[in-house]
Amino acid sequence: MNIELITFDLDNTLWESHEVLLRATEKTNAWIEEHVPEHSSLNTERLRELSDTVRRESPQIAHDVSAFRIAFMARCFKEVGRTVLEAQRLAREAFAVFIHWRCQVAPYPEAERLLAELSDSYQLASITNGNSDVSQTSISQFFTFNVSAENAGAAKPSIKIFHVALELGGISEPSRAIHVGDSLRDDVQGATNAGMKTVWLNHERELIENDATAVVHRLVDVREAIQRIDTPH
């Protein structure tokens, strides 16, 4: 056995995130409508301009989706007349609503069995650009550690976030680790550039040239793909 660590992306790899994000956004918008009703005066174009302003003025938080969301909301609240301190307080409170609902995820039915089986033989970890919290889910017990763009100081596909995971896992040779994810750019290209092996979860069965070590179309097939990679030829 050559593989020592398997890392997983979270959103749309171990659970579906689209509906979760929609619900979190709806709940947050409802809170903002109640507490900062004047926010509705900002049209889509102005919101986009304010978002661009935050990105331009605070490039150091571009990788951190939580910090960026808070900064963006604070900028919007200031735009509609709130003081800087009040805007910052309201942004933090609105974000608390968002992150509560953002973490209400339901792992795919096959995820628990897959992780349980793999954890018998490998060290498991998660690597995510998002701000969902795997520790609040029913599958948290299978992970030795979790790496986010926020705590790594970089987002996928940067090799930095993968190197943080390798270091935390005590892996000196990147080829002894496999990363599993649904994004060809963020997961496959990023992990490949970091020297890791990869399993691309190609939900849509896209016919795209890729550098993945293995390609599967269903999460349930990940275990077999990992076994093939870890079997000496």
Image (spheres, rainbow, N blue to C red):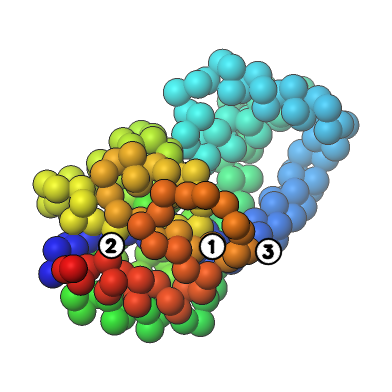
Give the side of residue 56 with respect to residue 196, left or right. Answer: right
In space, the residues marked 2 and 3 are separated at their CA atoms by 27 Å
* Marked residue nearer the N-terminal end (3 or 1): 3
Please name the amino acid that badge 1 sits on: Asn
Please name the amino acid that badge 3 sits on: Glu
Q: Position of residue 179 (x, y in %)?
A: 34, 56
Task: Choose mark 2 or mark 3, whichever is in front.
Answer: 2
Give the side of residue 138 with respect to residue 31, left or right. Answer: left
Q: Position of residue 96 (x, y in %)?
A: 56, 50
Residue 6: mark in rendering: 2
In space, the residues marked 1 and 2 are separated at their CA atoms by 18 Å
Residue 144 appears in the rendering: no
In space, the residues marked 3 and 1 are separated at their CA atoms by 19 Å
Residue 35, quarter of picture:
top right
* Residue under numbered circle 3: 19
Please name the amino acid that badge 2 sits on: Ile
* Marked residue nearer the N-terminal end (2 or 3): 2
Q: Position of residue 214 (x, y in %)?
A: 39, 62
Task: Choose mark 1 or mark 2, whichever is in front.
Answer: 1
Q: Residue at x 41, y 49 (%)?
A: 211
* Residue under numbered circle 1: 202
Number of residues whose C-alpha sits closer than 10 Å to that of mark 3, classed few (under 14), some (14–19) or many (20 or more):
few
Q: Secondary structure at mark 3?
A: helix
